[in-house]
Image (tube, rainbow, N blue to C red):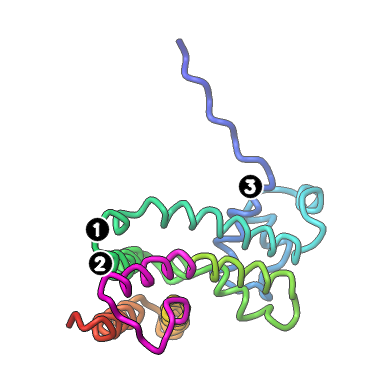
Amino acid sequence: MTKPKAAKPDARAKLLDAAFNVIRAKGYCATSVDDLCRAAGVTKGAFFHHFKSKEDLGVAAADCWAEMTGIFFATAPYHDHEDPLERVLGYLDFRRTILQGEVREFTCLVGTMVQETYDTAPAIRDACEACISDHAAKIEADIAAALDHANLKPDWSAKSLALHSQAVLQGAFILAKAQGGAEIAVDSIDHLQRYIRLLFNRL
């Protein structure tokens, strides 16, 4: 019995994949529809068949990135820790291990886009914010569980620490872009881990 051939990605999927790569390399504003079509190997007619505009593609790319990374992190090994604080710290360990390859390969698509579009493309900004906030909410649940486990009642919330972790990571990506490598991002994650251990008296 012959194995069925895997379906080839359609033009829309190719354009979204191209957006992940090109926008992280060049930025949203510097990326043209022609750049995306060239990278995807599709015609401009195919682009406008699937997307009304580059902004429309930006929103779709942010939504697709959220779905893809949501699955990626949901299946990561740090969830196996019984101790919720170890899940939080394990999440940061995992973030460190995926700082591989060139800068454009490990930086965040939605973080890149929102920096450029927050005031000019509200639909992209909102899609990026939803992705970042949804990701933070998953970490928030482990932070809240860690607080309960340690019987701590601080004057800060689990949500604020979860969002702070995303601020550090996105800032680390900016520094990595400025310095052209992952080393500074690794240092930033290490400092964040030390800070969280200090908050939970686990130095």
**Is residue 198 highlighted in magenta?**
no
Residue type at mark 2: give it: Glu
Residue 17 position, x and y percent, is 58, 53
Main SS of residues in magenta: helix
Foreground: 116 or 66? 66
State how far apart marks 2 and 3 are (Cα): 36 Å
Residue reaching furthest top?
1
Residue 88: image quadrant is bottom left
Foreground: 42 or 149? 149
Residue type at mark 1: give it: Glu
Residue 63 position, x and y percent, is 63, 59
Q: What element carries label 3?
A: helix
Residue type at mark 3: give it: Ala
Mark 2 or 3: the one toward you: 2
Residue 194 position, x and y percent, is 25, 83
The label on residue 82 is 1
> Is label 2 in contact with label 1 (beta carbons under 8 Å)?
yes
Mark 3 or 1: the one toward you: 1
Question: What are the residue bounds of the magenta stretch?
Answer: 136-160
Q: Is mark 1 on a helix, strand or loop?
A: loop
Residue 178 position, x and y percent, is 45, 85
Foreground: 155 or 33? 155
Q: Alpha-carbon neighbours of circle 3 within 10 Å: few (<14), some, or many (≥20)?
A: some
State how far apart marks 3 and 1 are (Cα): 38 Å
First along the sequence among labels 2 and 3: 3
Q: Is residue 58 above or below residue 49?
A: below
Q: Name the residue under label 2.
A: 86
Residue 158: image quadrant is bottom left
Q: Name the residue under label 3.
A: 13
Q: Alpha-carbon neighbours of circle 2 within 10 Å: few (<14), some, or many (≥20)?
A: some
Q: Is residue 14 above or below residue 172?
A: above
Quarter of the image with the N terminus in it: top left
